[in-house]
Image (cartoon, rainbow, N blue to C red):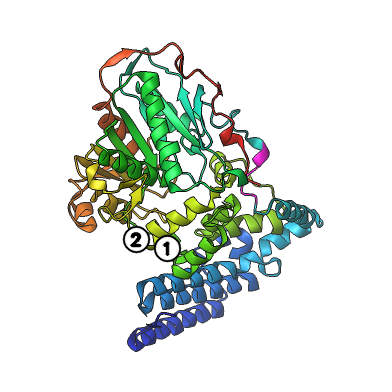
Amino acid sequence: MPKLAIPPERLAALQQEYVERWQELLQTAGGQAAPRLADKRFSHESWRENNPFAWTAALYLLNADFMRKLAEAMEGDARGRDRVRFAVQQWVDMLSPANFLATNPEAQRKLVETRGESLKAGLQNLLGDIGKGRISQTDENAFEVGRNVATTPGSVVFQNELIQLIQYEPTTPTVGTRPLLMVPPSVNKFYIMDLQPDNSLVAHAISNGHTVFMLSWRNVGPEQGQLGWDDYIESGIFEAIRVVREITGADSINTLGFCVGGTILATALAALARRGERPVASMTLMTTLLDFAEPGVLGVFVDESAVAMKEKAIAAGGILPGSELATTFSFLRPNDLVWNYYVNNYLKGEQPPAFDLLYWNSDSTNLPGPMFCWFLRHMYLQNELRIPDRLVCAGEPIDLRRIELPSFVFGAREDHIVPWVAAYGGARLLAGNVRFVLGASGHIAGAINPASKNKRSYWLGPSPQLEPDDWLAQAEEKPGSWWNEWTRWLGAYQGPLKPAPRAVGSPDHPPIEPAPGSYVKTKAP
């Protein structure tokens, strides 16, 4: 265990602060006024009344804040501090009085008002979720892939053991001669970029005259349990680039990688560059890690013993279940993605509302054990992608500087999976003309910020050579969606316009089945 300690003077200051705040609570109680509960978990009127529940919540908030400050005050090993903070936050969130029927007045009131029906419904919800092996976050019956999510028209024009390649139908009379290939994360399904027409990055790109192709990763089963990182590069990226060029006749294409999809894409392009092949004209990376020095909250799960345990279990073959990944990601934000639904679904007996983003979030994806373990060790644990020629992928030593492409790198300011400073650090590893754009919000809400709604804001600054804080100090905040900035940037690499194709595919690559294809519809058990 790493050595961690709280400086005595800091501990004394925190103890003094705790006593003062406790005394303020007592004074409030003496005046017969209800305590102030500045937390959305206690926003219902039943919590705001001057009753024991309100005081239980107030004391919980005081103690929770004190516990978090104690964890923050620790000095010592950085990774050890992160783990202590994470563990404390998990316990603090779990022990909220809102999470227990005996201390939740809102759930109790509903129990009385419904004459026990809410508790009955909650037990039924609990039994249903036990059968699923996860907490329901949305009404999953409200959505169907291909019916009301992932609906942009197109066809699968190529497939192999690992991928399907979708070509979408144009919506403009002319298109650029250089097509756009999108590479989604392998840990999620691609339709995060094509949820519904008004928030679809795919539809947005098509409406701006791009011929768009989407790589759809297979939701692997035991028969693909031997696939490794190189298979994702060779059977995934290499094959997709080859087929896109054959169908369109383009000498070079534009590419976009999202999250882990961006990591795989950049690795593949570096391998091609080592071979002297340059089939890509531009690269866009959305919330992507290339430098894993600051891996976000996920870093608390990764150390030598944890990686060795996974390698022993599945590195030689097997599957990492999508449900395991989904649970891990949910507990990165436990109040929003775990306890909120625990309270609503089970204590209050409510049905979760229909929400396309949460439907996608619950549609988990399996990964081959060898691929996952390689990624975990060489990227998260040993951070070797940033070291020139340290890694060998697809038979080639990898140096990201060889890519030498115009690159658009996007980070999200509140991202807990790919902290923006980490995305920025990846941009600094690239050669060529690199533009870094910082968006508001988090990993998904920041990235999927549709231009049609034009909400939030983004920051533009100088070339990413400065330290992150210096870059941000010089950056200018712009209102609206960063998609518009990306569209303007990508337009310069679109190539001359030509009449839009009348049909997707080609004689050598005819349509196989309508989009979104069958691979994305496969559910993880």
Residue depicted at x 36% and y 36% = 256
In this rendered view, identify the residue nearer to me: 442 or 102: 442
Residue depicted at x 42% and y 60% = 377
x then y, percent, for residue 436: 25, 44
- Identify the element where label 2 is drawn: loop
Disc 1 packing (10 Å; few <14; some 14–19; many ≥20): some
Mark 1 or mark 2, which has the lower sequence index?
2
Residue that label 1 marks = 299
Amino acid type at circle 2 is Glu
Whether tag 1 and tag 2 are in contact, CB under 8 A, the answer is yes
What quarter of the picture does the N terminus occupy?
Answer: bottom left
Q: State whether residue 362 is above or below residue 78.
A: above
Occupied quadrant, residue 272: top left
x then y, percent, for residue 452: 41, 30
x then y, percent, for residue 504: 46, 17
Residue 228 shows in this picture: yes
| Span colored in magenta | 136-141
Q: Which mark is residue 294?
A: 2
The answer to whether residue 215 is left or right of residue 430 is right
Q: State whether residue 271 is above or below residue 88.
A: above
